[in-house]
Image: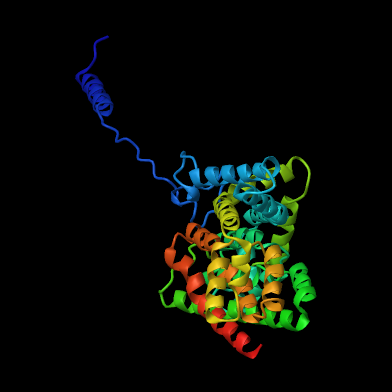
Amino acid sequence: MTDTPSSKDDDRARRELRRSLLNLTVPKPVRVKPVAERRSCCAPAAPAAGGSCCGGKRGRPDWLLRVSAGLFLFGIGLHYLTPETGWLRAFGDSCDGLLRQTWWGVALGILSVAVLGRVPRELVAALLGRGGSNGGLLRAVGAGVALDLCNHGILMVGMGLYQRGASLGQTLAFLIASPWNSLSLTLILGSLIGWGWTLLFLGLSVVIALVTGWIAERMVAAGKLPANPNSVALPVGYRVRPAIRGVLVSLKPGGGNLTRLWREGLAGSRMILRWILFGFVLTGLIRALVPMDVFQHAFGPTLAGMGLTLLFTTLLEVCSEGSSPVAADLLTRAHAPGNAFVFLMAGAATDYTEVLSLRETTRSWKSALALPLLTTPQVLVIAWLIQMSG
């Protein structure tokens, strides 16, 4: 059976169509990363369990963390292996003492970071209140006073709150109100210097925290300081209780959950731990190389003594448990209550560990330097007034 001209034309047309389809050049698909992947690990997304890139470029070792940890462990070894005298032994004793004083606070801080990592940002915003509001600042200060952690543990929690959406003003107010205002340390300080001075110092620290937070919020609103990119707006009808129940369910022990929490906390705290360990090493060197009698007798009730107090408490990484006895000595033995207040407050106002941690977390030197620049003048003026009236 022969093909008709029409069937030949149809076959030819089909062949031409097939050939043209085969010769088509299909453009190579371009992979567009979703928004969540393009975010920096320092942006709104919570740090992954694998670690944060904030401490350095991914894939590269964090030498500051490794060297600081190595020197700190070396110092602890010196405490047990070196003779009773010498600066090496003094360095070792300082490292061992810092470990004994701070291990519990640092451990609780690591676990707190892990817990915060499982708390939705909306819940943090609901509990802390709206950033930029007076109510939000009051809640942040109240949380700082209530938490019974040392300053190193509080630092981890504060950075976690910022990553979960707390405003810059709330974060600064939380950090300033926290270090020595926990219940246990307040009781210790009250027993050392009396409840009159203790309540006065406590009230003045809360005032400084509120004023600093308020100024920071106004500067953010004016565009002088960067806003927190992690902040979120609460959805309409958001309910707190179901969110809290969900968090509690995720924290139930069993099935290796506590181990996962610890690992998540270590990964999220790595950025802070590097500066804490660096501060411990620097503190050990200062204590080993600066004679104690020089340190004690230089802090009289004068402007020079107050300036030296500010300088040494900035350089000396004194844990909150250690700051209370030193402040008590400044008040009772040196008769310098203003210097005692400076010693207590300057750790929160000028501590380089907090400043560097804020820089790492906020990615802004302006936000980090706002802490000492806004708080130090207040601390010095109030301390001088205390000195004059005391």
- Residue 367, image x, y percentages: 47, 67
Looking at this rendering, what residue extends furthest in the bottom direction?
389
Residue 164: x and y, percent? 58, 60
Q: Is residue 348 visible?
A: yes
Residue that appears at 63% across and 70% down: 128
Percent position of residue 75, x then y: 62, 45
Q: Nearer the viewer, residue 325 or 364?
A: 325
Q: Which residue sits at x=59%, y=59%?
A: 160
Which residue is at 67% across, 51% downward?
93
Residue 71 sits in quarter: top right
Relative depth, front residue between 108 and 345: 345
Measured along the vertical axis of the image, is residue 88 above or below residue 179?
above
Q: Quadrant of the C terminus?
A: bottom right
Quadrant housing residue 302: bottom right
Instruction: Write the residue at 62% across / 54% down.
Output: 117
The x, y position of residue 379, in whole percent, is 56, 79
Query: Which quadrant is home to the N terminus?
Result: top left
